[in-house]
Structure formats: C-alpha cells, structure tokens
Amino acid sequence: MIHFIHAADVHLDSPLIGLARYGDAPVDEIRGASRRAFENLVELALREGVAFLILAGDLYDGDWKDYNTGIFIARQMSRLREANIRVFITAGNHDAASQLTRSLKLPDNVHLFSTRKAESVSLPELNVVIHGRGFTDRVVSDDISKQYPQAREGLFNIGVLHTSLNGREGHDVYAPCTIDGLKAKGYQYWALGHVHRYEVISSDPWVVYPGNLQGRHIRETGAKGCVIVQVDDSEVTDVRHESVDILRWTVAEVDASGTKDASDVMDRAAKALDQVWSNHGGMPVIARLRIIGASAAHDVFRANPDHWEAQFRAVAQEYGDGRLWIEKVLFQTQPEADIEERAGDEAIGAILNELRLLAADPSQVAGLLYDLNQLKQKLPADILLGPNSADPTNPQIMASMLSEAREFLESRLLKGGTQP
C-alpha cells in the first residue's frame, strides 16, 4: 500500500486581496500566507510519510519579484529530499509567465515535466507511472491531454494536467479537454490543477481538483488544502482532503427581515459572526457580511453605508480574540413597504416605473449595454478584473445595477434619505 499527496495552485507569494485599505487588517497573517500554507503542505507530507508529492501547476504566481521565492522553494524541496520524498511538478499558466523559474536549479528529488511534449516517469519500486506535461506559454488553447500515452498495463497510472476541462465557472479556459477523453486513457487517477476549489469530478476513474492551498480573496472561501490518495494493489482505496491554509475567507448572511432599526440588525450580525467564528474552530477568519431582507433600517443603511460598515467592523472586534475581520459589508436590504404603496406621488411613481420598464425591455437594455461597452473601453483594467470586478456589459451585473438604482432612487425620493 502506498499513499501520495496531490496539490495544485500554490501561487507562491501572491497577495491576499481586499483588506489593504483597512487599518485593522491582519497584516501579520496576510504577509507570507501562501508560504506558510506551503510549509504546512511539506509538514503534512513528512508527517504522513508519503511516497511522493504531485504539484499540478501554478506553483508560482507569474514572474518573481526576486530570487527569494526560488530559494524558499528549493529549501522546502530539500526537506522532502531528506525524507526520500520525490516531487513531480507540471507548469501551469502562471508558471509559464515566470522567466526566473527556468533558471532555478532544484534538488534531484524534483522532476519538472516537459513543456514541449507529454512524458512518463516510472517508479518501478512502487509499481507506479506518472504522465504529465507543462505549459510552454501562458495561454494554451489546445487539448494537450491528447498527447498523453495510453495507460501502461499492470501499473498504477497517474495523469498530471493543468486544465479547465470543458470550462469551470470563474476560471479562464486553459488546455480544454473532456472527461471522456481523460477516461479513455485508462489511467487510475488524474491529478488536475487550475480550479481553486476541491472537486471530485469522477471516482471511476478518479479525476480530482484539490483546490488551491490558501484562499486569497472573497471568491476563494472555505477550507483550502490538498488531497491524500491511498493506493492498494493498483486501486485507489481512499481520497481525502486535508486543509493546510492558515486563514479562511467566508461570506456571512444576516437576515434583517422584520428588524425595527439598525441596532436590531447589528444584534443579528453579532450572532452571525459568533457562528462564523465557531464554525472555523479558532482559525483566523476574514468575512464578508451580506445584510438582506426587508427592514425599517433600509433607508438608514443606504443613506450612509460607510458609517454603518464601520459600525459592523466594530462589532466583529468583539469576537475571535482579534482574529475575525470584516472584508466588506454589502447592504442588500429592501424597504419594508411595497414600492407601489409608497410611490403615491405621480412623478416619483413615473420615474420608478420607467426603471422597471427599462429592465423588462430587451431592446432598451441592449442599447444601454452598447453604450456601456463604449465606456468599458476607457475603464482601467483593475475595475474589470479581480475579486471585486464589475463589468458593466455583463447582463447579470446590469440587472443588479438597475435594481440598486431603483432602490436608491426610492430611498432618496420617497424619504429624502436619513442620516445616522
């Protein structure tokens, strides 16, 4: 019986996004988070005494700022070498962007798969053969899995591939391929990378995304880590996910329905944050609060969201011994009364009705999207990319913006807004 670790998407030395502008941000926790998670991965490999470690792409996060990144990796690989643990690495799209990586000399226990063609490495003492190929360029639009050889009979075959398969939500398309195409190779295990959440695509044969090692922003919530695979007589007998992250991201929903004022909502938020802290067993947590539901506090929140976000941040400080932080507060409440009942004024009702008609008329929305597309060309790239991206030409985002505009106008026109 043997067991090995399958990890991917380390994105070493990449920053955690979304907290820098806050004075109470966990600077010490954030700095070096990806390195600490990688150290935890190495510790896990040593503790479990695995036969080998597979890193299925994006070990790095593009080109290094300096050689310290490479020195760190070499040191960690040497620790594994001392324990006779071999390491097999494929280059992903982010690795392909790194120039310094290509000149880095790693210990002899590390095998970097070719970026030109698929190759196979036999481990006769384990009755295992590992097939893999890395990315030559950052963008790979071909199905490189077609280059992989058929399974070798009598051996446990592992395929290592950085791919988006046939498309995964929230991820760009790289090295696209199909599940049927992978199964046709006859391998017992496919060690995939690129998707940043743990996902078992198939168990016959096993096709697995381990997710990334450390969540870096609010779109990467929950426990992050690797998988430990147990093999007995060339058959997978166990696949389990092990977390190695050093802090977590989460979204906490606070239902403000029926609350009489902001104080009531804050009481409910306190209970939600207490639950968040309990759910993660004392690990540092970065939370986004979503305040939803119909509440009498709706207009107050809309009138001065920055003020109330600061208030919710203060509430968070009461929990987690200073290890629970708020990334952002989204005020997505609605007014208690129905809009038609409140909009008795003919002019106000006409304005609000016009927004409703606009959202319901595909031709008008299409015209608006065309105008916004012209505006999009002039926007800075950081507005359109990243964890808080907002593409105004996305129909779903457009619908949300129209809804928010209607609520904002309702609050301002019907009540004139309320200051805290």
Image: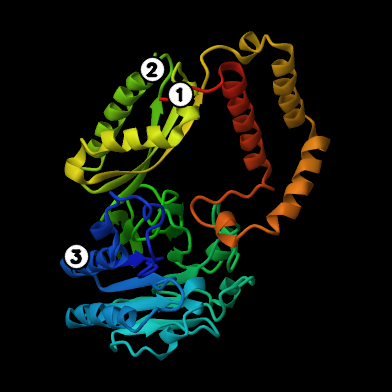
Residue at position x 83%, y 37% in the image: 363
Question: Do the residues bearing badges 1 and 2 touch, measured as CB atoms within 8 Å?
Answer: yes
Compared with 292, 89 (above or below) is below
Distance CA(mark 1)–CA(mark 3): 54 Å
Determine which residue is flagged by label 2.
Answer: 261
Label 1 is placed on what type of residue?
Val
Q: Which mark is residue 300?
A: 1
- Provide the secondary structure element on which disc 3 rests: helix
Image position, residue 271 (x, y; %)? 27, 27
Q: Earlier in the sequence, mark 1 or mark 3?
A: 3
**Nearer to me, 22 or 57:** 22
Q: Earlier in the sequence, mark 1 or mark 2?
A: 2
Image position, residue 20 (x, y; %)? 37, 56
Question: Residue 63: which quarter of the image?
Answer: bottom left
Compared with 131, 365 (above or below) is above
Residue at position x 58%, y 66% in the image: 174
Question: Do the residues bearing badges 2 and 3 touch, measured as CB atoms within 8 Å?
Answer: no
Question: Do the residues bearing badges 1 and 3 touch, measured as CB atoms within 8 Å?
Answer: no
**Nearer to me, 91 or 396:** 396
* Identity of the residue furthest to the right in this view: 363
Question: Residue 61: which quarter of the image?
Answer: bottom left
Comparing marks 1 and 3, which lies closer to the viewer? 1
Q: Is residue 133 visible?
A: no
- Provide the secondary structure element on which disc 2 rests: loop
Question: Residue 341: which quarter of the image?
Answer: top right
Determine which residue is flagged by label 3.
Answer: 48
Mark 1 is surrounded, within 10 Å at the Cα level, by few (under 14), some (14 to 19) or many (20 or more) other residues, namely some
Label 2 is placed on what type of residue?
Asp
**Nearer to me, 149 or 50:** 50
